[in-house]
Image (cartoon, rainbow, N blue to C red):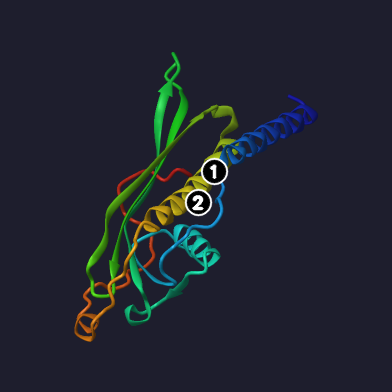
Amino acid sequence: MTIANTKRRRLIQATAGLTVISLLSACGWRMRGKVDLPYSKLLISGVMTPEFKNDLQLVLKANDVQIVNQVKDAEVVLEIITEQNAKQVLSYNASGQITAYRIISRVAFKVFNTNGIEIFPESDIFLTRDLDFNPANIQSFDYMVNEVVKNMRADIVVQMLRRMSSIKTIEKPTNTNTQGYSRTIKPSTSPNNGTTSPSK
């Protein structure tokens, strides 16, 4: 294969990858509008990837919600119970080569008032996207996977806040219960959930 043909092939692959991403974005996977949230100060707790926390903070700020670091300053406490991202083999061809992957993203969360009382029960958001795979186009595929994961993460954040918008009343904390609040902010590190990273 000549150098010219190699360059032409790489250009086609890159263009195809960008086309797919554009189509995914057109399907409505971007963050959509504002969410009517019944609180203005929120504390984020739990274990999550830095990317998820960053997206969550951006959307909260866009919805005029102040992110605080202490329970005494918050109206509600959002606890991320688990965040999982995985890539699973979806299909093989007759030669035993992988032809498609399923990309999986899942987040489970709860909401508490500053008394430590659960005001929104554990809720689970589970998304999947299927992508065809060509072993001759691995670099472009990895890029597409990363973009799909980003879109899924943004979609999960918006879905999560829309569910939280159903919280109608927030009990005012008492001094005793506020001082005795037992939940603490956990480090924002990648969860060790035993799944395969989608970017691998």
**Observer-nearest of 13 and 157:** 157
Secondary structure beneath disc 2?
Answer: helix
Report the residue marked by disc 1. 29
x and y percentages locating residue 149 in the rendered image? 49, 45
**Observer-nearest of 17 and 76:** 76
x and y percentages locating residue 28 in the rendered image? 56, 41
Residue type marked 1 = Trp
Q: Residue 179: give its label.
A: none
Q: Residues within 10 Å of mark 2 (few under 14, many from 20)?
A: many
Q: Residue 154: give its label.
A: 2
36 vs 84, left or right, is right
x and y percentages locating residue 55 in the rendered image? 50, 59
Secondary structure beneath disc 1?
Answer: helix
Q: Is residue 6 above or below residue 72?
A: above
Report the label total: 2
Q: Is residue 85 above or below residue 13?
A: below
Residue type marked 2 = Ala
Q: Is residue 59 above or below residue 154?
A: below
Mark 1 touching mark 2, by CB under 8 A?
Answer: yes
**Observer-nearest of 77 and 85:** 77
Q: Residue furthest top?
A: 94
Residue at x-position 56% and y-position 44%: 147
155 vs 188, left or right, is right
